[in-house]
Image: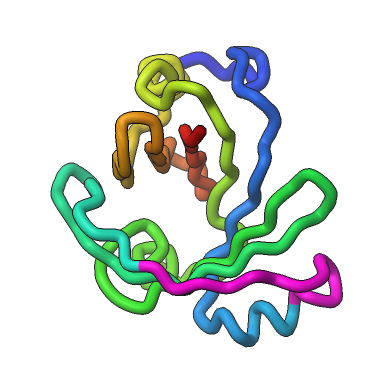
Amino acid sequence: MSQQPLQAIGLPPIDQVGFVVRDIDAAIAQYEPLFGPFSRMETPIEGATYRGRKADCELKIAFGRSGNLEIELIECVSGEGPHREFIDAGGEGMHHLRFRVEDVDAWLPKLKELGYDPVWSKRWSADTVFCYLQRDGDPTLLELLQMP
């Protein structure tokens, strides 16, 4: 397994840092003084692939900004996925780093060479896909997002 930096293989700069929280309202109150106002939404994610099987979840999500960097806060309301897994393991805080790419499928073999395996993904349409990847021993997940 290679140890080269992600940018060395051509990944674009990080465009989002995702935090998993137990209480999104409390997290918004905590982070608004740092990042300004957050927009908030609740969304079901149905039919995603989670650790090799179909799984649904419902999330509360809030988005803020720091310059060009998006700050995402996520509270898992119900169901299965990496956010619930993180909270159940006692975690709360930084969870993932997102990279916007033109073709998620083209990046998967390159990241596999670096030890990253897909853990959660969904194809919303032919050109809108997300995939979270995890590497043994690394607590931070990577997210690839393909979206027009």
Q: Is residue 104 above or below residue 133?
A: above
In the image shown, does 143 or 114 lie closer to the viewer? 143
- 4 sits left or right of 44 in the view: right
Dividing the image into 4 quarters, which one contains the N terminus?
top left
Residue stretch rendered in magenta on the structure: 31-43
Which residue lies most toward the left here?
53
Name which residue lies at 35% across and 32% down: 117
In the image shown, does 58 or 53 lie closer to the viewer? 58
In the image shown, does 86 or 15 lie closer to the viewer? 15
For residue 112, what is the image quadrant? top left
Q: Is residue 6 above or below residue 81?
A: above
For residue 71, what is the image quadrant? bottom right
What percent of the width, then of the height, locates residue 107? Answer: 44, 20
Name which residue lies at 37% across and 57% down: 82
Q: Is residue 32 magenta?
A: yes
For residue 30, what is the image quadrant? bottom right
Q: How many marks?
A: 0
- 29 sits left or right of 1 in the view: right
Figure coloring: rainbow
Q: Is residue 18 above or below residue 38?
A: above
What percent of the width, then of the height, locates residue 14? Answer: 67, 37
Name which residue lies at 59% across and 44% down: 97
